[in-house]
């Protein structure tokens, strides 16, 4: 088999607590994992496993933390919630789309952040909320 461009295609990940299976679509219209805003008109993914781990760890709900390998079904764009505000140049490789993400598979073996680091992140998000700065650019 010869190597082609598709052999080296970029992988994308989505962290959540939703119980999904290959072929399922993650569509717009769901609540954010990070704020209490109205349902979002974008779906989010990342090309880094670390960003997806944060998504899974911070996701609302009581389900098991999960990370899915996903395939965008339409165009993706840099996520301005992190690229413009926190990390110019998009080093987290965070993206969003108005089109669904198709679940390709699940990442089973991943390393969670330490309990201390997770609490730091939760404390930071709570401080943003208390200050009224937990806005999502939708």
Image: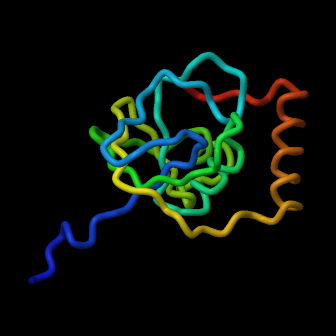
On screen, residue 76 versus residue 109, left or right, reads left
Q: Determine the residue positioned at 35% across, 34% down.
A: 100
Q: Determine the residue positioned at 36% across, 36% down.
A: 25
Locate residue 32: give its quadrant.
Answer: top right
In this orientation, which residue lies closer to the viewer: 60 or 134? 60
Q: Determine the residue positioned at 28% across, 38% down.
A: 74
Quarter of the figure with the C terminus: top right
On screen, residue 80 versus residue 5, left or right, reads right
Image color mode: rainbow
Residue placed furthest toward the left: 1
Q: Horizontal and vertical percent for residue 56?
A: 63, 49
Locate residue 61: give its quadrant.
Answer: top right
Quarter of the figure with the N terminus: bottom left
Q: Horizontal and vertical percent for residue 62?
A: 71, 38
Taking 43 as reference, is 90 above or below it? below
Q: How many marks?
A: 0
In this orientation, which residue lies closer to the viewer: 118 or 74? 118
Residue placed furthest toward the bottom: 1
Taking 31 as reference, is 13 above or below it? below
Q: Determine the residue positioned at 70% across, 50% down.
A: 57
Q: Horizontal and vertical percent for residue 67?
A: 53, 54
Taking 37 as reference, is 90 above or below it? below
């Amino acid at each position: 088999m010869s190597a082609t461009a598709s052999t080296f295609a970029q992988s994308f990940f989505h962290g959540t607590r939703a119980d999904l299976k290959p072929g399922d679509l993650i569509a717009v219209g769901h609540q954010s994992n990070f704020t209490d805003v109205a349902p979002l008109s974008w779906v989010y993914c990342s090309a880094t496993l670390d960003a997806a781990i944060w998504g899974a760890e911070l996701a609302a709900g009581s389900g098991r933390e999960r990370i899915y390998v996903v395939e965008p079904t339409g165009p993706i764009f840099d996520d301005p919630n992190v690229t413009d505000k926190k990390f110019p140049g998009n080093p987290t490789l965070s993206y969003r789309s108005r089109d669904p993400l198709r679940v390709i598979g699940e990442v089973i073996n991943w390393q969670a952040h330490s309990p201390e680091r997770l609490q730091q992140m939760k404390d930071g998000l709570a401080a943003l909320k208390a200050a009224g700065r937990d806005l999502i650019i939708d």
